[in-house]
Amino acid sequence: MISAILSLLGSSAVGSILGGLFAFLNRKADMESKRMDLEHERNRWAHDLAVKDKDLEYARTEAAGRKDVAIIEGEATIESSRFEAIAASQAADRVTADELKAAGKMRWLLVLGVAMNRWVRPLATIILAGAAIYINLLFVGKLVEVWPTLDATKQYDAAMQAFAWITGQAGAVLGYWFVSRGTSK
């Protein structure tokens, strides 16, 4: 019996079966290894995509921050330039001692011109503001008489026109006084 078992085990059929079984197990291990490699590669690609998405998000945030800084710096430059222009216009209204010496006997004309230059804007502003207030009072007086006869739409239109008129006048006065100041040099 032992010799039969040993002859059976030593036969080529058992060797072929054992070789096939180990080849199958080896192939199964190779396939499992390949599957694990592919799974690892897929996870690596997913991780790389997530990292790239975070990089893009960071770049967008950084670009938005740089844009905000540029806007703030631009506004600061504009304000600085505006204040420099105001200072230059104030400096242009001054008369120096050298200018008075250079004017000679006619220096009183230079002093008179500077005085007129300093008083023209305030006087013009007061006159224009007084005329605007007078016209506004006339308008309000007429509007009080007519207001009850107007329907709601016409009342709204009249109120908007009055608002535009008053803000236009204020804009003209403020623009003349603060923006349109010419230099005398």
Image: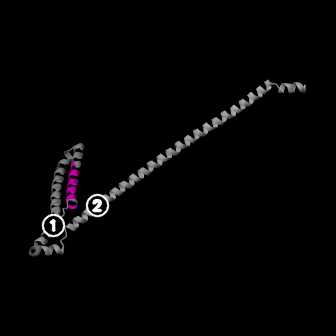
Q: Quadrant of residue 39?
A: top right
Left or right of 128 in this view: 31: right
Disc on the earlier residue, 2 or 1: 2
Q: Main secondary structure of the magenta part?
A: helix
Of 92 and 163, nearer the camera is 92
The quadrant in which the C terminus is found is bottom left
Residue at the spot 71% in from the left edge and 33% down from the top edge: 26
Magenta-drawn stretch contains 23? no
Name the residue carrying label 1.
117
Give the colour scheme of this rendering.
one colour
| Residue type highlighted by circle 2 | Ser
User: Image check: 56 left or right of 160?
Assistant: right
Q: Residue at x 69, y 31 (%)?
A: 27
Q: Work out whether 57 lies above or below 135.
A: above
The residue indicated by pointer 2 is 81
Q: Residue at x 17, y 50 (%)?
A: 145
Please name whichever residue, 163 or 178, is drawn nearer the observer in this view of the structure.
Answer: 178
Q: Amino acid at mark 1?
A: Asn
Is there any visible trace of residue 107 in the rendered image? no
Q: Is residue 11 visible?
A: yes
Q: Report the Cα–Cα distance between label 2 and label 1.
A: 24 Å
- The span shown in magenta is 161-178
Seen in the image, is 15 located left or right of residue 184?
right
Outermost residue on the left side: it is: 105
Q: Residue 169, percent across and down?
A: 20, 55
Residue sticking out furthest to the right: 1
Badge 1 marks a residue whose secondary structure is: helix
Residue count near mark 2 (Cα–Cα under 10 Å), binned few <14, some 14–19, many ≥20: few
- Please provide percent x and percent y for residue 19: 75, 29
| Number of marks drawn | 2
Answer whether labels 2 and 1 touch (C-beta < 8 Å): no
Q: Please indicate whether residue 17 sits to the left or right of residue 33 in the image.
A: right
